[in-house]
Amino acid sequence: MMTEMTERDRFNLCIQKFIDRDYELSLSLAQEIIAKEAVITIHMIFSICAQHLRRDDLINRHSEFIIRTMSQRPMELALINLILGKIESTEVLSMAYNNDLRCIAYYYIGERQLLDRNFLAAKKSFETSLNFKCKCFEYMIVELVLKKFDQFYTGKDIKEDGLFESVDTTIYKFNDLLEKLASEHQSGYVYRGQNQDYGTLLTSGYRNAVDTRQIPFCKTGNHSLHDRGNVFRPLIDKIQWTKDQIRLWDFSALCKVKIGYLLSQLFCQHCCLPTEGLDVTEDFRVAAFFSIFNYKLNCYIDNSAQLGIIYRIKVNVNSSLSFPDLKKINVYSCPFYVNGANILHLLGRCENQSESIKSLNIYFNEKQDIEDSLENANDILLNLPLEYIKLPDKELGKSRIMMQRAGLIFPDTLLPSYYEATSYPPPFGKTWDGPRCTEDLLKNDNVEAFFFRHNSQNEKIIELNPVEVFPEMDPIRSILSNFISSMSRFLEIPIVLQNDSVFFLNDEKELPR
């Protein structure tokens, strides 16, 4: 947590964090400064940070404010419009009638080029800016930006003479990226593909519960549950949650109690319900497919202004889990990565769906006997009769988890101190005095991001059938949906699973037709 700062300290820290490309903290500091004084440099930093973070809500409000307040200051208004992508750099340069303004103009042209991920052009613009030797904040900033430029944007993609190998060295052609991932693949790599970069990497269970208005917490010593996260995002106070958020959270908690932590996460993942794990695959081709196919629109991504992205994540290569492991692992002891197929193979086998559903009913009856004989919640979880659950052998290979070679990455967590008083407390020393937070995996040391440009030819490179990779209702999902719905009898209001959503039975009118 930051201590009280003077306005000068806040201004300097805002610029320093911007130079360090810590856009979250720089944006927050810029907001505080703008609220008290109008400094064009800070307005520009605010706009740049908001765009890097994909904060359209802030960008729209801020651009409206700038247009109103700077209508009589054409150069400054032009710079803002340049950063917002509303005018071309040539228009700004035509207004720069002296060297001071040319220095400033070329600097912001470079920042606009960074937003467009045209890194070579950006570096040249920054170097041009320095040629004018202007006495202004921008000259100071661009000097420091250039000192760290290679570290942030090029790494090993620089020749010995200091020149870039090519324009946009960190943006790949789709085919080139696949060849790179194939040549570098090794045991312990898993992947995730997305149509675009959202500025964060959060699990589906927390994605809508994170408070993006608050500054994320950086590494907090050994207070985090697993001591493996770097940046943590606070969750919205539960009193501010929507009714649907509360229902899903409570239902997720019910699943954990009824079938254990790992199995509940995997089953919910298979049924497209929010989980505390991030969907990944051990096959980079599957990740690549998800990065170019939009299942909501049921089509491939054509030419798009947004960049596609494939994450490569380094995980520990553990030996296969055993049945005792499946029962023993909980929210407090969960490993970083869990292989979905590994867990499914632990369960029993049967001939068909009806036998599988019958096994689930047997499981519930046996579990009820255990609950009647044991009082301690942890003892019940350790003795869950999971061996009674069976899946049809012939249909298992056609399931989503198997077709996608899917698994789950589990982020680190910061737990408030009141968790110590719960009936199932975390290990000693693993709470803190702040709010509950989840790790933003985008900042995890084991996560790498690779960008590529969408175009209509990419779909020809990945020859995978969308229906096979992500079947709408595979046999295993049908069984698990029945299983999850049957657990609803333990709730006051039964639920049904339909079209990838949880609905309560008094919500029939809201069910999709």
Image (spheres, grey):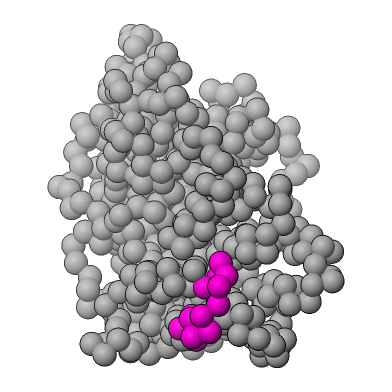
Q: List x then y, in percent, for residue 474.
A: 46, 57
Residue 465 position, x and y percent, is 45, 74
User: Which residue is at the front of the view, 356 or 129?
Assistant: 129
Instruction: Please report the bounds of the magenta region as a residue range.
Output: 126-139
User: Looking at the image, which residue is at 36% across and 9% down?
Assistant: 375
Q: Is residue 236 magenta?
A: no
User: Residue at the spot x=72%, y=72% of the render?
Assistant: 76
| 253 shown above or below 408 | above
- Name the image quarter holding residue 101: bottom right
Picture quarter containing residue 75?
bottom right
Q: Is residue 191 above or below residue 83?
A: above
Q: Is residue 123 left or right of residue 45?
A: left
Q: Nearer the viewer, residue 468 or 264?
A: 264
Task: Choose between 54 and 255: the one closer to the eye.
Answer: 54
Q: Viewed as shown, does residue 152 lie left or right of 198? A: left
What residue is at 54 percent from the left and 39 percent from the top?
5
